[in-house]
Image (tube, rainbow, N blue to C red):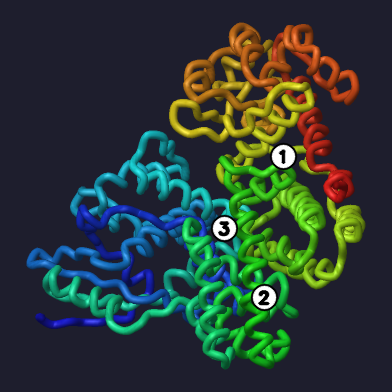
């Protein structure tokens, strides 16, 4: 083996270099769990020092964060080939692109972008040079959007993770927070770059780092500690078999064992916010340090902890994760799926917090329904009022509920949470709730909920799953007003005095001016006039779109009955003018208040 060099480097020093990735190593596989963990770890470390009163110069005194090693081979042409670390570098590139769109300071934005994209004597390319990703990265770099339909798995995964970054960073960060976080990220987060002259040497280093010795996961270390305290060999073997059986049942879930243990311990045993956060990063050490407080003293306590508690919470966690799946939604637990669609992983510790072993199945379901319904209402009120539902923003609110709910039954939980909602914002959406660059995925999900609610209340079959189908059957957001101001004004008889161009750009994005259409039709009809063409087409589509045409009310008795009973302000304009979009905005807000009504809590508590 030739010379090996290891250099501690900041992200600014490291990611500003050019890197190639071998063709057999180009898959980008990070899922939401890995990204959530990274965002949470970085945010917690940064927030330990952050203050809104700080200036960029103060960031120099912030604490550092170590992101681990990467392994690189450098060939004779000085090309740097990544052998280990491309998942992290890809994720960091996506994070820098996302942050660059959030910054108000043009100078800082350009400095950040120079780490992502470079110009070598007129040849422009991304510093992480993977040709099949270039189109996607360029689109995200330019405007933060890319249609990943029909793209390779890596590209689709990159777009999904980028949207997750938007939802977890962009929607909640103040301009000051984003600016200082960007400075901290590139200047105080470190990696160790291990370099060698040949690819074979680099792979030998990689294998040595990953294969030598027993690399135990936190879950395995926790199991080792618990089993060690069970003195009887037969009992220890029995407990080990029970643990393994439950872990195997979670094998289909990425990081299922770790997510289960975090959620269980946070929900049932965290007493302080410090406990909650430490369980999130070092639960095996936390249990060891707090075993007495958890009433783990005698060998029988440890055997019970595995043989009763672990088995119970593992089974409940698996049921919840299955309910979160679109293809396995469980009746009564639909809200678990809706929350999972918003990447709201904090639902799991709160849901498990209200459960104890040996509860009757009926009471388990009641408690889960009530808590999930509450979180569904809370999350959508936050989204509808432009506030964050990212974990770092919601962590305190969720933790504060955990000790309050642990000892309550379903009816008591419903009463308690209903009173909590009385002190929150009473309407689901703000009057000007609209689509913007960062909330498109959330708007899509909300439109799917509104459409499905309208259809099921009109005695039509649920097509909720269709609105999230991929490929040729996918649905997209349709603007009733297309994007050409002059043409829309002419087509819909709108005067410039009534709607100015700037107001037009704002109002066309109001949620009341949006519907869902099949992708193929959205592309065909999107730029056509409403009154002359699209209105007739809409009547053949889903109920929310079809409600714009008076024929739908005439032909659908269930819809007509729903309108009469609800008193909601449906109307069917022949032209779509300013007053019509305002009426439609009011309609959507009233529909949302019905869907996310606090009355659902006591309904959920019923058998």
Q: Residue beneath label 1, please?
A: 433
Q: Give the label, 2 or 3, closer to the camera.
A: 2
Question: Residue placed at 12% from the left, 71% from the top?
Answer: 198
- Furthest toward the left, the residue is 76
Corner quadrant of residue 347: bottom right
Q: Where in the figure is residue 67, as x and y percent of width and height?
A: 41, 74
Residue 380 percent across, percent down from the top left? 73, 47
The local secondary structure at tag 3 comes to: helix
Q: Can residue 172 be seen in this view?
A: no
- Tell me the residue that label 3 is attached to: 169
1 or 2: tag closer to the N-terminus = 2
Give the label, 1 or 2, closer to the camera.
2
Secondary structure under tag 2 reads: helix
509 above or below 248?
Answer: above
Marks 2 and 3, how far apart at CA? 21 Å
Of the numbered discs 2 and 3, the one sitting upstream in the chain is 3
Residue 435 image-quadrant placement: top right
Residue 48 seen in render: yes
């Amino acid at each position: 083996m030739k010379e090996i060099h290891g250099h501690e480097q900041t992200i600014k020093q490291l990611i500003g270099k050019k890197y190639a990735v071998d063709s057999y190593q180009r898959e980008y596989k990070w899922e939401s769990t890995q990204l959530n963990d990274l965002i949470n770890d970085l945010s917690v470390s940064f927030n330990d020092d952050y203050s809104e009163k700080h200036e960029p110069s103060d960031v120099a005194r912030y604490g550092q964060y170590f992101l681990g090693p990467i392994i690189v081979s450098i060939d004779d042409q000085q090309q740097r080939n990544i052998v280990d670390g491309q998942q992290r570098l890809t994720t960091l590139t996506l994070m820098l692109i996302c942050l660059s769109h959030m910054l108000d300071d043009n100078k800082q934005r350009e400095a950040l972008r120079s780490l992502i994209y470079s110009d070598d004597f007129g040849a422009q390319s991304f510093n992480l040079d993977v040709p099949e990703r270039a189109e996607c990265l360029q689109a995200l770099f330019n405007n933060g959007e890319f249609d990943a339909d029909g793209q390779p798995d890596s590209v689709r995964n990159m777009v999904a993770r980028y949207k997750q970054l938007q939802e977890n960073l962009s929607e909640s960060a103040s301009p000051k927070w984003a600016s200082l976080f960007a400075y901290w990220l590139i200047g105080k987060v470190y990696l160790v770059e291990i370099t060698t002259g040949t690819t074979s040497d680099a792979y030998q280093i990689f294998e040595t780092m990953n294969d030598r010795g027993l690399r135990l996961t936190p879950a395995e270390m926790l199991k080792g500690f618990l089993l060690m305290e069970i003195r009887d060999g037969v009992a220890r073997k029995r407990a080990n078999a029970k643990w393994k059986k439950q872990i195997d049942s979670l094998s289909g879930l990425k990081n299922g064992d770790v997510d289960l243990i975090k959620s269980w311990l946070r929900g049932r045993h965290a007493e302080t916010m410090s406990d909650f956060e430490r369980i999130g990063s070092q639960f095996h050490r936390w249990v060891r340090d707090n075993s007495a407080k958890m009433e783990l003293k005698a060998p029988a306590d440890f055997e019970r902890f595995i043989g009763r508690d672990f088995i119970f919470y593992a089974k409940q966690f698996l049921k919840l994760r299955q309910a979160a799946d679109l293809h396995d939604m469980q009746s009564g637990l639909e809200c678990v799926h809706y929350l999972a669609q918003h990447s709201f992983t904090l639902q799991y510790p709160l849901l498990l917090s209200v459960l104890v072993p040996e509860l009757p199945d009926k009471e388990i379901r009641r408690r889960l329904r009530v808590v999930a319904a509450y979180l569904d209402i809370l999350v959508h009120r936050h989204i509808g009022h432009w506030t964050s539902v990212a974990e770092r923003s919601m962590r305190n609110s969720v933790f504060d509920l955990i000790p309050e709910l642990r000892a309550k039954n379903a009816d008591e939980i419903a009463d308690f949470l209903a009173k909590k909602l009385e002190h929150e914002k009473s309407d689901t959406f703000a009057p000007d709730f609209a689509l913007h660059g960062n909330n498109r995925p959330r708007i899509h999900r909300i439109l799917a909920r509104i459409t499905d609610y309208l259809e099921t209340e009109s005695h039509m079959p649920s097509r909720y799953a269709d609105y999230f189908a991929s490929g040729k059957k996918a649905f997209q957001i349709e603007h009733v007003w297309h994007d050409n101001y002059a043409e829309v004004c002419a087509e819909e008889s709108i005067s410039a005095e009534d709607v100015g161009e700037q107001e037009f750009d704002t109002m066309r994005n109001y949620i009341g001016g949006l519907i869902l259409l099949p992708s193929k039709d959205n592309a065909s009809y999107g730029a056509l006039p409403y009154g002359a063409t699209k209105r007739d087409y809409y009547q053949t589509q889903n109920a929310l779109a079809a409600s714009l045409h008076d024929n739908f009310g005439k032909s659908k008795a269930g819809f007509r009955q729903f309108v009469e009973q609800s008193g909601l302000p449906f109307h069917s304009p022949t032209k779509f003018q300013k007053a019509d979009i305002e009426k439609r905005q009011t309609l959507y807000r009233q529909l949302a208040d019905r869907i996310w009504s606090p009355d659902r809590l006591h309904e959920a508590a019923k058998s």
